[in-house]
Image: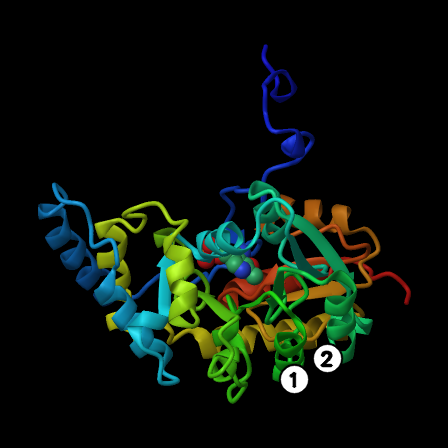
Amino acid sequence: MTSLDDLPIRDDLRGKSPYGAPQKTVPVALNVNENTHPIPEDVAHDIVARVAAAIIGLNRYPDREFTELRTALARYLGHGLVPEQLWAANGSNEVLQHILQAFGGPGRRALGFAPTYSMYGLLASGTGTEWVTAERDADFELSPETAVAAVRRHDPDIVLLCAPNNPTGTPLSLDTIAAVADAARGVVVVDEAYFEFADPGTPSALTLLEGRPRLLVSRTMSKAFAFAGARVGYLAADPAVIDALRLVRLPYHLSALTQAAALGALAHSGEMLSMVDEIRGQRDRIVRELAALGYRPYRSGANFVLFGDVADPHAVFEALLDRGILIREIGLPGCLRVTAGTEAETTAFLEAMAAFTPAAS
Ligand code: PMP
């Protein structure tokens, strides 16, 4: 049998592992921060009609510039953004890949603040970009001083700021983002994949774009929008940044079906986002009830909660799985991460957690 090692694979990919969140069919899947509410049926019907119309034209390539979608995304984001400032791809993972292809590469360096989203390192290695991480402050917070010191120390070509941060849930202040943007010589990416779950009134990094042509803000339809299966992520930045991304994307990378489906979802954004308040409520309930059980939940601005003081995370993960509840082991000692689900899913998780004894802290 041929193994990976037998192949003439790039030396810098040897020994690496692919992204590997377990995909299991279980009654309560709270492991990859999806929106666990299905999309509303009337929206689904409209999307079907739009996709059906697009199918007739599949003999032709799709609009390579996805102009209608960029226009709809600009309208959705507001903040005075125009379509020329918008980009989209198959999930924000692909948006991030475009950024690393255009601004990273051999001899260049990307900086993140660990623990952070595991794909950053994988996208860096896929593009031959050096990946370095710096530490956070206590409780996974990130102050302007700590972040700027790391930027000065590592002099990165790309800084990846995850706001709120996955897997910790930690919100990131605009002060830290602005300080990093001012200190960095390279591009600064603010990954706002979970932004819609932030407490109402939280300002977006989009408010910092004006006058900062090296600041990039990425978003996704996978989380709050309940559209993970459609694979649509997007980005707002200076039009010159969009021109840079055009150099590395594959022609026609967004299929006509994807564009039609995304336009359908955006046409019903209010309804698609209607479960966000409910999910935020379940998140706050998880924080409250886990604390009451003796665990240590961290501050979260996302649709998931990282919690510590778990005596044996792997044993708890397995015991929950035996009950049909899938959460996430993220390799942080004493910690597990859980997505806020529906009320019933959250109840199932919390009731199961009550059976374990937390670590003495
Ligand atoms: N950024 C962060 C922080 C994420 O957690 C995820 C998904 N887990 C993504 C980006 C990518 O999501 P998608 O490709 O589905 O847009």
* SS at mark 2 in the image: helix
Q: Are marks 1 and 2 in contact (CB under 8 Å)?
A: yes
Q: Residue furthest right?
A: 360
Image position of 11 (left or right of 265): right
* Residue type at the position of mark 1: Asp
Image quarter hosting the C terminus:
bottom right
- Residue located 45% across and 56% down the image: 95
Image position of 249 (left or right of 59): right
* Residue type at the position of mark 2: Pro
Q: How many marks?
A: 2
Q: x, y percentage for residue 220?
A: 43, 63
- Residue located 60% across and 29% down the image: 10
Q: Nearer the viewer, residue 310 or 100?
A: 100
Q: Residue furthest top?
A: 1
Image position of 114 (left or right of 244): right
Question: Quick check: can you spot residue 175?
Answer: yes
Q: x, y percentage for residue 254?
A: 30, 51
Question: Quick check: can you spot residue 264?
Answer: no
- Residue located 41% across and 73% down the image: 275
Up-down relation of residue 18 to residue 189 (above or below): above
Q: x, y percentage for residue 98?
A: 46, 53
* SS at mark 1 in the image: helix
What is the number of the mark on residue 175? 1
The Cα–Cα distance between marks 1 and 2, rounded to whole angstroms, is 6 Å
Q: Residue furthest left?
A: 56
Sooner in the amino-acid sequence: mark 1 or mark 2: 2
Q: Nearer the viewer, residue 265 or 323?
A: 265
Q: Nearer the viewer, residue 281 or 82?
A: 82
Mark 2 sits on what residue? 144
